[in-house]
Amino acid sequence: MITAAPYRVKFVCWTAAAAVAVIFTVVAVGLRGQSEGVAVFGVGDQVAMIGLGLLGATAILWFTRPRVEADADGIRIRNLFGSYDLPWDLVREIQFDAGNSWASLELVDDEVVAIMAVQAADKGRAVAAVRGLRALHSAALVR
């Protein structure tokens, strides 16, 4: 069984999400002010600012969603939007061409499905994942 998820993106996203949440919270705490003729920020504004920070952090963490799992029966891909559960007999080829950001599947009906979990930025991990997927694909075609 092969399981892969983006490694570097996960680290960057968790770091960025934490930074966004902290920055929005610090700014919210500093939003107190009572002046005439100037905007006054109350507790509701502070809560809203913290909420926006948490919403932004959640949006950043969405990029950690991609994952791929494969076994002798088929491949299951979860990308940012959408998921695929495909048997190996629908897969013509597993592509990971130079210059591409991530691997992809070419299906027998000429459709191409991105495997966003296997990213070029992960270098050796991505190559190992593609080799494992190709080995499972080849073994399934022999059966």
Image: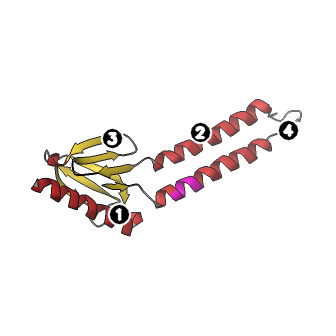
Q: Hey, what amino acid is under mark 1?
A: Ala
Q: Where is mark 4, residue-wise?
A: 33
Circles 4 and 3 in contact, beta carbons < 8 Å: no
Q: Residue, x 22% and y 60% (percent of image)?
A: 134
Could one spot residue 126 in this view of the protein?
Answer: yes
Q: Residues within 10 Å of mark 4 (few under 14, many from 20)?
A: few
Q: Secondary structure at mark 2?
A: helix
Is 14 colored magenta in this rendering? yes
Q: Of callouts 2 and 1, which one flags the residue occurring earlier in the amino acid sequence?
A: 2
Front disc: 4 or 2: 2
Give the mark nearer the N terminus: 1 vs 3.
3
Residue at 58% in and 45% down:
57
Say which amino acid is labelled 2.
Leu
**Residue identified by numbered label 3:** 83
- In the image, which residues are magenta? 11-15
Vertical comparison of 81 with 124: above or below: above
Give how far across and how far down residue 103 sits, in percent: 30, 57
From the viewer's side, name the closer residue of 107 and 129. 129
